[in-house]
Image (tube, rainbow, N blue to C red):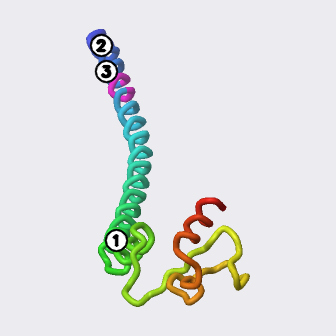
Amino acid sequence: MNFKKLLTIPALILGLLIVVQLSRSIILMHGRGGRGKELAAEVAGLEKEKAELEREKEFRQTEEFVEREARDKLRMVREGEKILVLPDGQNENGSGFKVQGSKNEGTEANWKKWVEFWLR
């Protein structure tokens, strides 16, 4: 009987150590599960951003985008189009707009227009 008591104490200690280690492992795995949810949310956000960038890339490859960029940044126009120049002040007709190539432009000498432009 003495021999049984002698084996019972180490068996209890060993069992207690196993329970503690298993508990720690379960707690760590539960904590990592929360991190997994965070990573899944981050992946979903990145996939959404990727889809948005793909749409933008497709749009930038269209002819419409190229034409708009040429008009906005390079100030290009199609053949036969007229350009509206918005002056700082009002022009003769009081509208504030001036059409390049209009009939009113040809009445005054070009050098006078430049002098007026620079001395205004």
As measured in the structure, the alpha-carbon distance from the residue carrying label 1 to the one carrying label 3 is 68 Å
Image side of residue 110 versus residue 93, left or right: left
**Label 1 Cα neighbours within 10 Å, binned few <14 / some 14-19 / many ≥20:** few
Counting from the top left corner in percent of width and height, residue 93 is at 70, 85
Residue under label 1, please give it.
Answer: 60
Q: Mark 1: which amino acid?
A: Arg
Q: Nearer the viewer, residue 97 or 103?
A: 103
- The mark tally for this picture is 3
Q: Secondary structure at mark 1?
A: helix
Q: Nearer the viewer, residue 53 or 61?
A: 61
Q: Which circle, 2 or 1, is nearer the viewer?
A: 1
Residue for point 53% across, 69% down: 111
**Marks 2 and 3, the one that precedes in the sequence:** 2
Q: Nearer the viewer, residue 64 or 23?
A: 64
Q: Which circle, 1 or 3, is nearer the viewer?
A: 1
Residue under label 3, please give it.
Answer: 14
Q: Which mark is residue 1?
A: 2
- Considering the whole magenta stretch, tell me its main secondary structure: helix
